[in-house]
Image (cartoon, helix red, strand yellow):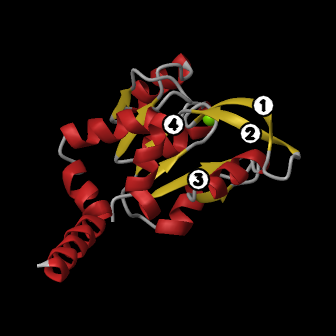
């Protein structure tokens, strides 16, 4: 199964915390993210895993957006966690900081946001890892650009993913319409 592991802060969110009132009127922390990532998140489903050293707000966000979330305590290796979860299975990784270096280097496809640390790029070049720097900044729709790039490179097929995700509903609607026509004729 095709898998994307992604860091959260600086990739899916800007890392900036803000407050909002939840349904109960209580103030709650959130982080700024882009709605451009909503469709990619829906299309990927279980194939997307957020992995982060920061638990509190990021886990809440993951629950809200129905995404698998792996919290790795500070000082523990994200790559070891990935190996523990999915073994040697190839994966795509998106990360923006030196803490993501190991995971980026071991990934089959590695991406860094436009505003990732330039030091990270030098280090990746030095290690000869296959990686791409995105045009999108962290928190502004990184996942969307990654999916479009993977599609262009024929690693994934967005058309198939869309049919798999929404085809069933479309079939249902056609069946319902037929029934209605049958009843009235
Ligand atoms: Mg980060």
Residue at x 70%, y 53% (from the top left corner)? 59
The vertical placement of 149 against 108, above or below, is above
Q: Which residue is mark 1?
A: 18
The vertical placement of 17 against 155, above or below, is above
| Of the image marks 1 and 3, the number of the one nearer the N terminus | 1
Q: Secondary structure at mark 3?
A: loop
Q: Does residue 109 appear to the left or right of 174 in the view shown?
A: right
Residue 181's image quarter? Answer: bottom left
Observer-nearest of 38 and 98 = 38
Inter-mark Cα distance, 2 to 3: 12 Å
Residue at x 33%, y 35% (from the top left corner)? 130
Split into 4 quadrants, where in the image is the N terminus?
bottom left
Q: Which residue is mark 3?
A: 65
Residue at x 56%, y 57% (from the top left corner)? 67
- Tell me residue 31's x, y (percent): 70, 35
Q: Which residue is mark 4?
A: 35
């Amino acid at each position: 199964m095709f898998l994307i592991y992604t860091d959260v802060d600086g990739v899916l969110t800007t890392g900036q915390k803000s407050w909002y009132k939840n349904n109960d009127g209580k103030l709650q922390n959130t982080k700024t993210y882009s709605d451009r990532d909503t469709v990619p998140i829906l299309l990927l489903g279980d194939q997307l895993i957020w992995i982060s050293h920061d638990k509190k707000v990021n886990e809440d966000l993951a629950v809200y957006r129905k995404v698998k979330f792996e919290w790795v305590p500070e000082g523990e290796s994200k790559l070891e966690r990935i190996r523990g979860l999915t073994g040697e299975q190839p994966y795509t990784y998106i990360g923006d900081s030196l803490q993501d270096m190991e995971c980026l280097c071991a990934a089959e496809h590695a991406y860094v946001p436009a505003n990732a640390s330039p030091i990270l790029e030098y280090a990746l070049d030095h290690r000869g890892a296959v990686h791409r720097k995105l045009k999108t900044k962290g928190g502004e729709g990184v996942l969307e650009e990654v999916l479009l790039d993977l599609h262009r490179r024929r690693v994934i097929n967005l058309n198939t993913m869309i049919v798999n995700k929404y085809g069933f509903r479309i079939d249902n609607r056609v069946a319902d319409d037929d029934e209605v026509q049958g009843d009235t004729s």
